Amino acid sequence: MVVLPRIEPMLATPGPLPARDEHWAFEVKQDGQRAMVYLPADGTVLLRARSGTDITSAYPELAELGSALSQSAVLDAEIVALDPEGRSNFERLQSRMGLTGSPTKAARMAASVPVHLVLFDAVYLGQDSLVRAPYTERRAVLESLELQGAFWSTPSAVTGHGAQALEMTRTAGLEGLIAKRLTSVYEPGVRSRAWIKIRNLQVADVVVGGWVPGRGRLTGLPGAVLVGQPQHGRLRYAGSIGTGWSDKQRAVLAHLLRAAATDTCPFDTPPAVTGARWVLPRLVGEVRYATRTRAGLLRQPTWHRLRPDLTPDDIL
């Protein structure tokens, strides 16, 4: 029986396009769920989320990947759900996440909302660790495996031409790029400057600390959420967000907020918001915004998605 080493995913740091892009490779940034893929060459596959949780049973359509290689491997990947235009769509993927305890429902959802596994790194192959090998070598190994199937693929990476690649993603309505230094080793569990995520929009991960009830047709539902970002061990208030949800998403959020209710304000300085209700600071969301004020508040923020794969401790 092959026992594969458990390897934490390497993380990217937000930033601009590198100045000398000939030293970098560029991959399309996917809007999905990170997964480390363990293939022991016995016909099985094990998928672990960024947190280390076993999420294999939530994605039964990926089971056949276990028979795709004749040698054992650990690969880095992103699980996505594609929209009709072939773009990763996190809202579609959310209906697939969290079904590890319900194989029957997972199988039913796989038929209606299939996922696709985007493979982008090889960190272990056969009996050899590749974490100290440069990106170019690991990428060559990954591409040599020729993993292309109905539910998984190895998209190409582009060396140099970062500005053109970013413009391509913007035109195609994609989130952005991941730039990877060609000489970089794989740093398990590290948020590294050797990988840079470049987004077409300003995006931030935030912690929900409170909410304000809606009115009219939104009675009983959140009209806005109050969010913050960790700073020096405290939660600093970053603003109020009242747009970006579908009715279904707002209802789901209402349920989560009620379950997290508390009488104590979690922000280091309580915001002067009339009618605010506080919650335990455990829900993480991703928001898009224009700029920030001098005080650090988000300008024109819009809710993008919940991040059930993150905890407040994961926020940079």
Image (spheres, rainbow, N blue to C red):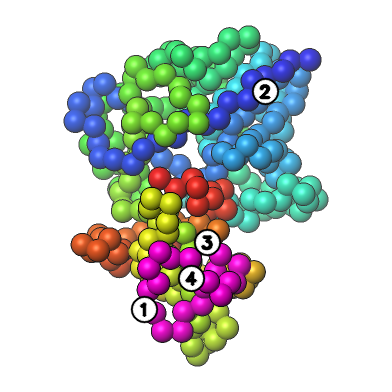
Q: List the residue tagged with mark 4.
A: 265
* Residue 58 painted magenta: no
From the viewer's perspective, is 3 left or right of 95?
right
Disc 3 vs disc 4: which is toward the camera?
Answer: 4
- Which quadrant does the C terminus fall into? top left
In 3D space, how far apart are the residues under numbered discs 1 and 3 (Cα atoms)? 18 Å
Element assignment for label 4: loop
Earlier in the chain: of badge 2 and badge 1, it is 2
Q: What residue type is labelled 3?
A: Pro
Asked whether residue 290 appears in the rendered view, the answer is no
* Residue position for label 2: 39
Q: Which of marks 4 and 1 is nearer the N terminus?
A: 4
Magenta stretch, residue numbers: 260-281
Residues at discs 2 and 3 in contact (Cβ within 8 Å): no
Q: Report the disc number at residue 272.
A: 1
Q: Distance between the residues labelled 2 and 3?
A: 37 Å
Binning the other alpha carbons within 10 Å of mark 4 as few (below 14), some (14 to 19) or many (20 upward) gives: some
| The quarter of the displayed image where residue 49 is located | top right
Whole-percent x, y for residue 123 in the image:
53, 20
Amino acid type, callout 4: Cys
Chief secondary structure of the magenta portion: loop
Q: Which amino acid does label 2 sit on?
A: Leu
Between the C-alphas of marks 3 and 4, the distance is: 9 Å
Chain-order first, disc 1 or disc 3: 1
Q: Taking 90 as reference, is 69 above or below it?
A: above
- Report how far apart the C-alphas of labels 4 and 2 lie in the structure: 46 Å
**Total numbered labels:** 4
Which dot marks residue 281?
A: 3
